[in-house]
Image (cartoon, rainbow, N blue to C red):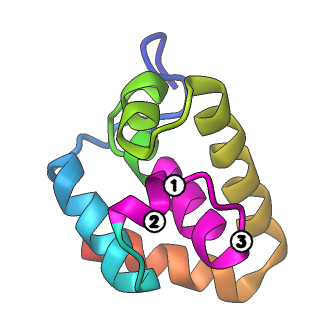
Amino acid sequence: MNAMNPYAVPGVVSCKKPADVVKLVEEAFDVSLEQIKSKARHNHIRVPRQVLAFLLVRYGLTTSKAGFIINRDHATVIHSVKVVEDTIDTDADFKKLIEKLKIRL
């Protein structure tokens, strides 16, 4: 962890543009950025939004910048990161999905 971004993975430097991460999540979950940015709370929109926030922060964006991309505030992004981390710890299928997405980045 670092002072600028305590949620970033140590030693990982983003090699992708945020737009590439957005495109990956859009394709993986079959949703558009417009849907992700919407106020919808349905699982088929909420989960990709949380995963996108998680990946953006993990690969170098601040929580504020990630929040700007998904139309949420930084506190929501922090919550999303924690939700994804907790789900990875408890759901093996979800963990495999996240690992596959990380590999594609």
Query: x, y percentage for residue 15?
Result: 15, 50
Looking at the rendered structure, the kind of residue marked 1 is: Ser
- Picture quadrant where residue 75 is located: top right
**Neighbourhood count class around disc 3 (C-alpha, 10 Å): few under 14, some 14–19, many 20 upward:** few
Q: Gap between marks 2 and 1, in whole Å?
A: 5 Å
- Mark identifier at residue 79: none
Query: x, y percentage for residue 74?
Result: 56, 25
Residue on which the image places disc 1: 38
Is 42 in front, or is 91?
A: 42
> At 63% across and 77% down in the image, what residue appears?
95
Q: Name the residue at the right extreme.
A: 90
Question: Does 92 sit above or below residue 38?
Answer: below
| Tag count | 3
Residue on which the image places disc 3: 42
> At 47% across and 18% down in the image, what residue appears?
2
Q: Quadrant of the C terminus?
A: bottom left
Task: Please give the range of residues in magenta.
Answer: 33-54
- Picture quadrant where residue 28 is located: bottom left
Looking at the rendered structure, the kind of residue marked 3 is: His
Residue on which the image places disc 2: 35
Looking at the rendered structure, the kind of residue marked 2 is: Gln
Magenta residue check for 65: no
